[in-house]
Image (spheres, rainbow, N blue to C red):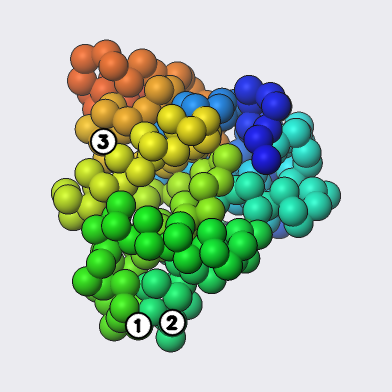
């Protein structure tokens, strides 16, 4: 099933926080079909919080969130079959093998047994996980657990992918596999929101880059321009100066 709208996610004047503490303020952002939207910001800027809101784990205190045309807090569970994500520490079932994790995820996202088997083997090959896939996840290295979690998030070919710092523990080869997998997802029309501290990688893959600082959007940057890292730090520095003056 395909969404018949361009905006897979729309955040409109979004405010969110934890127990009375305001963390995200007046954020407007869209994730579009076939595009990679990167979210960058220093530690504590609010990237994970914003993603929790999109995934229906936190309610807005102001404004609204629309995911695949619905409000996440009230969406039917079947909508989540069209979404894939990793958040904070990538989740896996540690007593299952990598292959079992990926297959279970595909099945839980509504894929038939035959399709799930084929999708599992295809994504194991795409991520170069052939040697690790038969091992219990608890015996894998941190980076390989991350690769299994990413494969599990993507095996069911979601229309929307929310990826919180997916490259953190990955080696350069795994980063290349992920980049290819993300490109292949956007070619079939998926939209991706990805947070990252790796600005060189962001410059390579993103169509749009939003800078979040102290829970506010302070700029949208052109990923193709010169020295994304410098432009990012200049913006954050200026925002900090503004906040302290
Ligand atoms: N469960 C929570 N309860 C209370 N405050 C929280 C909780 N989770 C995050 N925060 C606070 O919300 C703010 C934003 O945190 P968040 O994890 O969204 O930032 P981030 O941009 O993802 O940071 P990082 O790059 O370090 O992952 C921080 O001040 C953090 O302390």
Q: Is mark 2 within 8 Å of ligand 1?
A: no
**Mark before the other along the chain sequence, 1 or 2:** 2
Q: Is mark 1 within 8 Å of ligand 1?
A: no
Q: Residue 87: x, y in percent? A: 49, 56
For residue 194, side relative to residue 136 (left or right) = right
Q: Which residue is mark 3?
A: 201
The nearer-to-camera label among 1 and 3 is: 1
Q: Residue furthest bottom?
A: 95
The nearer-to-camera label among 2 and 3 is: 2
Residue 86 in sight here: no
Q: For numbered disc 1, what is the local secondary structure?
A: loop
Q: Are marks 1 and 2 in contact (CB under 8 Å)?
A: yes
How far is mark 1 from mark 3, CA to CA? 30 Å
Which residue occupies the foreground of this view, 163 or 234? 163
The N terminus is located in which quarter? top right
Q: Is mark 3 within 8 Å of ligand 1?
A: no
Circle 3 packing at 10 Å, graded few (<14), some (14-19), many (20+), is some
Residue 121 in sight here: yes
User: Which corner quadrant of the image does residue 150 belong to?
Assistant: bottom left
Q: Which residue is mark 2?
A: 96
How far is mark 2 from mark 3, CA to CA? 31 Å
Q: Which residue is mark 1?
A: 136
Residue at the image position 38 percent from the left and 79 percent from the top:
97
How far is mark 1 from mark 2, CA to CA? 5 Å
**Mark before the other along the chain sequence, 1 or 3:** 1
Residue at the image position 26 percent from the left and 29 percent from the top:
204
């Amino acid at each position: 099933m395909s969404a018949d709208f361009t905006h897979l996610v729309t955040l409109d004047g979004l405010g969110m926080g934890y127990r009375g503490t305001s963390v995200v303020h007046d954020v407007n952002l869209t994730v579009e079909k076939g595009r990679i939207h990167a979210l960058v910001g220093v530690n504590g800027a609010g990237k994970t919080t914003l993603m929790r809101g999109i995934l229906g784990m936190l309610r807005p205190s102001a404004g609204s969130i629309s995911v695949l045309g619905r409000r996440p807090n009230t969406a039917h569970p079947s909508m989540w079959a069209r979404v894939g994500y990793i958040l904070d520490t990538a989740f896996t079932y540690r007593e299952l093998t990598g292959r079992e994790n990926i297959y279970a995820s595909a099945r839980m996202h509504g894929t038939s047994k035959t399709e799930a088997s084929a999708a599992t083997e295809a994504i194991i090959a795409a991520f170069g996980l052939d040697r690790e896939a038969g091992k219990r996840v608890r015996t894998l290295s941190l980076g390989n657990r991350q690769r299994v979690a990413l494969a599990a998030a993507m095996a069911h070919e979601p229309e929307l992918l929310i990826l919180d710092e997916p490259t953190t523990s990955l080696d350069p080869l795994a980063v290349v596999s992920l980049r290819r997998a993300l490109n292949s997802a956007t070619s079939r029309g998926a939209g991706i929101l990805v947070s990252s501290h790796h600005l060189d990688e962001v410059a390579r893959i993103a169509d749009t880059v939003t800078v979040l600082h102290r829970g506010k959007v302070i700029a949208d940057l052109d990923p193709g321009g010169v020295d994304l890292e410098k432009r990012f730090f200049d913006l954050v520095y200026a925002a900090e100066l503004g906040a302290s003056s």
